Image (cartoon, rainbow, N blue to C red):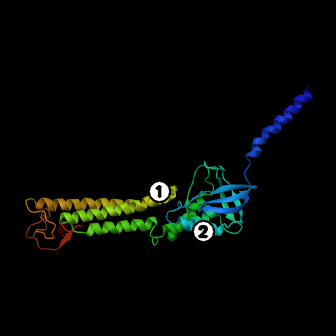
Amino acid sequence: MRAAVSAAAVILTVTSFLPIAAAAAPSTAGLVERVADGDTIVATVDGVEERVRFLNIDTPEVGTCMADQATDFTSVQLPAGEVIALRYDRDLRDPYERLLALVKPAEGEWLSVSLAERGLGFPLMIAPNSAFYPRVVSAANRAKRGKVGMFSPTRTCTPIARTRRANALVSQAASAPVRTRAQYEAANRKLNRALAVLALAAASRYGVKSAYFTAYTKALMAPVRRRANAVRASNTRQWNIVRNASSGHNDTDDDSSSSNNGGWWPPGVSHSYTGPRCYEPGGVIWYPC
């Protein structure tokens, strides 16, 4: 009886270790089959074809700005048949059952770092996989300082290029006269167009979920949006002054203005003042310089 109990205990002990063996980390080497997009490849690992998602990096969604450049870069670095090194963090798989790993060609840098330092990808930290995140952030900071990739103002689809175009439209609206209804409405159309262009700079427009990239785009957009709102408010004040001053007259769209500049005169300033005038945007409200 004792021998039978001992044998059962041995079987139970061995069986208890089987789940641990099944959950062991995959191999630290693999073979590239093909590239899916900038941050995902298909590779053979332990004899099984796996979709491998790079850790701590997020590249633009397919069809958005510079997504093709990110995919092309990964394809050059990881051609089919390339032997790759793999490194893992705490969680091995995402909800889509993709294997989560840092990936490096036989000779070269980890792709998460290479993509970030070229502005083709952005730091992404999904807990608990954060071990390599600081290094990717450092690479992205270098790209931002160097104004490369998605940080370049010369590429028309990048957030900084779009916010600069939006700001230029705001400047046009700020400098436009608002002495007539047509002018006022034209300035508002400029501001509406500026805000539409500005919306294209949001991180969500690129399919990027990186908190780093989201913070970057918000920092670019916020001052332009505030300026657009301020110009709209200033133009509205000036148009109201002109409209109220012209009550009882024909509301025409000609550019003529009365000798006292559409009815506006600075409070506390004598109407005999003939000195220099400094105008607010819109060309109606002025004060002595």
Give percent across and percent down for residue 194. 34, 63
Q: Amino acid at mark 2?
A: Phe
Give percent across and percent down for residue 283. 20, 69
Side (left or right) of 230 relative to 85: left
Side (left or right) of 4 relative to 99: right
Query: Which structural element holds mark 2?
Result: helix
Q: Residues within 10 Å of mark 1 (few under 14, many from 20)?
A: some
- Residue placed at 16% from the left, 60% from the top? 241
Query: Which structural element holds mark 1?
Result: helix
Badge 2 vs badge 1, beta-carbon distance below 8 Å: no
For the N terminus, give its image quadrant: top right
Residue reaching furthest to the top: 1
As measured in the structure, the alpha-carbon distance from the residue carrying label 2 to the one carrying label 1 is 23 Å
- The residue pinned by badge 1 equals 204
- Residue placed at 11% from the left, 61% from the top? 245
Relative height, residue 17 to residue 118 (above, below): above
For the C terminus, give its image quadrant: bottom left
Nearer to us in this view, 94 or 89: 94
Q: Which mark is residue 245?
A: none
Q: Residue 243 occupies which quadrant of the picture?
A: bottom left
Q: Residue 46 occupies which quadrant of the picture?
A: bottom right
- The residue pinned by badge 2 equals 73
Q: Residue 171 occupies which quadrant of the picture?
A: bottom left
Q: Amino acid at mark 1?
A: Ser
Q: Residues within 10 Å of mark 2 (few under 14, many from 20)?
A: some
- Residue placed at 50% from the left, 69% from the top? 145
Relative height, residue 13 to residue 164 (above, below): above
Give percent across and percent down for residue 120. 55, 65
